[in-house]
Image (cartoon, grey):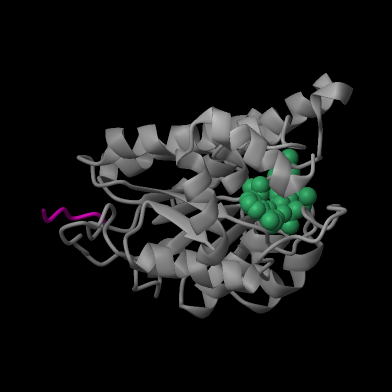
Amino acid sequence: MTTPLMGTHAVASSAADPAIPKVGPVSAGASYAQVETRRWGQLNAPMTQWQGRRVWLVGASTGIGLACAQALRAAGALVVVSARHPQSVQDWAAQDKGVQWLEMDVSDPLQVQASARALLAQGPLDMVVYAAGYYRAQRATAMNLDEMLQHATVNYQGALQVIHAVLPSMLSRQSGHISVLSSVAGWRGLPNGLAYGPTKAALTHLAETLYIDMQDHGVGVSVVNPGFVATPLTAQNQFTMPALISPEQAAREMLKGWARGEFDIHFPKRFTFWLKLLRLLPYRLYFPLVRKFTGL
Ligand SMILES: NC(=O)c1ccc[n+]([C@@H]2O[C@H](COP(=O)([O-])OP(=O)(O)OC[C@H]3O[C@@H](n4cnc5c(N)ncnc54)[C@H](OP(=O)(O)O)[C@@H]3O)[C@@H](O)[C@H]2O)c1
């Protein structure tokens, strides 16, 4: 099976549209994508050449998203970094023309639409990474509906808004890749995951369905399932996190996964292997095992 993913594309016109907000210095003029093909068994065309590729990372002001933006930039990509708080990115963007900060709150659909329009007016996006995330431990004995809805807004609905805003352009070019940060916490029900887990299960399901629909249209789709990564999101955890890795390690795993053309990019394997096994168990075994391992 040989399917072109990244077609060579012409640089889009950057004619000024007064309705579109001005955004920073990354020029699409340098953006190009080489034709790559996927080999038998590869679910996506491998992405190994990042030079000049234009990647929009949403939710990348800290943690995994930021580390991934840094790793992609180091590999030659032109990165656009979005989130609400610019602190960790502004200086970097000021010093490096290949880095663009575009402030955006994913819970505001109008902001997402305007941002996507502005970026696409500059030129095509080769990849969009959805890394925005929100996590607070919650159990059903102390159910908090506002918190649950906040998880849904950031983790799932924000992804829908972003994908809805960029997919038509990728479809019309038959080129591009969408990667969503999900979590092993979405694989099966877990204690403390009442608000977070279902949003990640939904994201994974969304990615699977997107993949099926996009496979004949030249648009790659991948889902990233990290175990525990030391970021502001997990800093609140009160327990010793097994197989904890750094955001930089997570970013390396993601680039490796994209280079191999994987759909399901999960890591660290010494942790996710066991969770994959747990995923296969019937409920009568799964529930008592989870209680035994977590003590909850
Ligand atoms: N850390 C882990 O162990 C782990 C494990 C599995 C999956 N994940 C997933 O990996 C992704 C990245 O998480 P992380 O661990 O790197 O956490 P993080 O450092 O807290 O990053 C979360 C990012 O989301 C952004 N964000 C939150 N609300 C937003 C909003 N309304 N609009 C725009 N951006 C928003 C944050 O930026 P602002 O606050 O500046 O907006 C930040 O850049 C998340 O989807 C998370 O669920 C993490």
Q: Position of residue 204 (x, y in %)?
A: 49, 38
Q: Is residue 293 left or right of residue 255?
A: right
Report if residue 6 is visible in the image: yes
Q: Position of residue 259 (x, y in %)?
A: 36, 68
To which quarter of the image does residue 197 belong?
top right
Q: Position of residue 292 (x, y in %)?
A: 71, 44
Towards the viewer: 68 or 169: 68
Q: Looking at the picture, does residue 225 appear above or below residue 208?
A: below
Residue at the limit of the structure toward the left, as seen here: 1
What residue do we see at 47% from left, 78% from top?
A: 75
Q: Is residue 169 left or right of residue 21?
A: left
Q: Is residue 131 left or right of residue 9?
A: right
Read off the magenta span: 1-5
What residue do we see at 20% from left, 60% from top?
A: 38
What residue do we see at 50% from left, 52% from top?
A: 224
Q: Is residue 152 magenta?
A: no
What residue do we see at 48% from left, 49% from top?
A: 276
The dominant secondary structure in magenta is loop
Q: Looking at the picture, does residue 85 appear above or below residue 48?
A: above
Q: Position of residue 105 (x, y in %)?
A: 71, 40
Q: Looking at the picture, does residue 87 appear above or below residue 216?
A: below
